[in-house]
Image (cartoon, grey):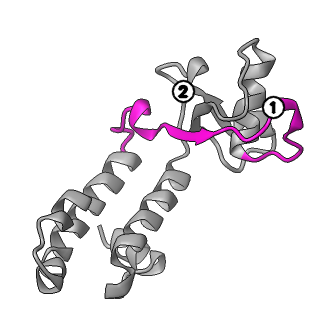
């Protein structure tokens, strides 16, 4: 989507490319729903700000860091952790994310959470043209 918008020379060119951006958005949403996205493309990378044991909440970065530490992989502040959101709302916090060293080809991903992240990314690009997540979700509902 950024590549599409990057071809615009001015504001009018930007606005003219919005339909193409929305096509890309719908395509990627379809891929997510159909399980057609490689797990490596869904990897979230975050920089660790503290030792794994110092994370007191079940934030995604904290959970991923603790998973690694619990399996003997040391992660220190300033290092990057990569993980997949497997079930953002799972009652068992450990099931919410999976650190990349422990991702297997059959690791599930949380389709709805990734759709939310996709909507937020498009909203960031097109907000000034009237596209918020609610409008983008409505667009997906019609597909």
Residue at far front of view:
78
On screen, 86 above or below 59? above
- Residue 99: where, in percent of width, then height? 62, 28
The residue nearer to you, when weighing 131 against 87, is: 131
- The quadrant in which the N terminus is found is bottom left
Give me the residue at 54% from left, 33% from top.
108
Q: Which residue is mark 2?
A: 107
Of all residues, the one furthest to the top in this rendering is 72
Q: Foreground residue, 61 or 95?
A: 61
SS class of the residue under badge 1? loop
Judge whether residue 32 can be spotted in this image: yes
Residue 1 visible in this rendered orientation of the protein: no
Mark 1, Cα crowd under 10 Å, few <14 / some 14-19 / many 20+, is: some
- State the image coordinates of residue 94 (x, y, percent, origin top left): 77, 33
Looking at the picture, does residue 123 appear above or below residue 90? below
Q: Residue at 52%, 19% (x, y): give it.
A: 104
Q: Earlier in the sequence, mark 1 or mark 2?
A: 1
Q: CA distance from mark 1 to mark 2?
A: 26 Å
Residue under the point 32% across and 73% down: 142
> Is 70 on the left-hand or right-hand side of 125?
right
Residue 123 within the magenta-colored segment of the rendering: no
Task: Give the residue pinned by disc 1.
Answer: 51
Question: Is residue 93 left or right of 6 when viewed as pictured?
Answer: right
Image quadrant where one finds the C terminus: bottom left
Q: Which residues are magenta?
A: 34-59
Residue 34, relative to residue 22: is it above or below? above
């Amino acid at each position: 989507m950024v590549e599409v918008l990057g071809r615009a020379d001015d504001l009018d060119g930007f606005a003219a490319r919005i339909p193409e951006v929305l096509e890309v958005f719908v395509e990627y949403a379809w891929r997510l729903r159909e399980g057609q996205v490689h797990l490596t493309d869904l990897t979230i990378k975050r920089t660790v700000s503290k030792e794994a044991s110092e994370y007191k909440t079940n934030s995604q970065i904290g959970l991923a860091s603790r998973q690694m530490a619990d399996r003997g992989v040391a992660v220190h502040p300033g290092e990057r952790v990569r993980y997949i959101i497997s079930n953002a709302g799972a009652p068992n916090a450990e099931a919410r994310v999976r650190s990349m060293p422990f991702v297997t080809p059959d690791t599930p991903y949380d389709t709805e959470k990734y759709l939310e992240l996709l909507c937020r990314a498009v909203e960031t690009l097109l907000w000034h043209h009237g596209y918020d997540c609610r409008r983008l979700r409505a667009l997906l509902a019609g597909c």
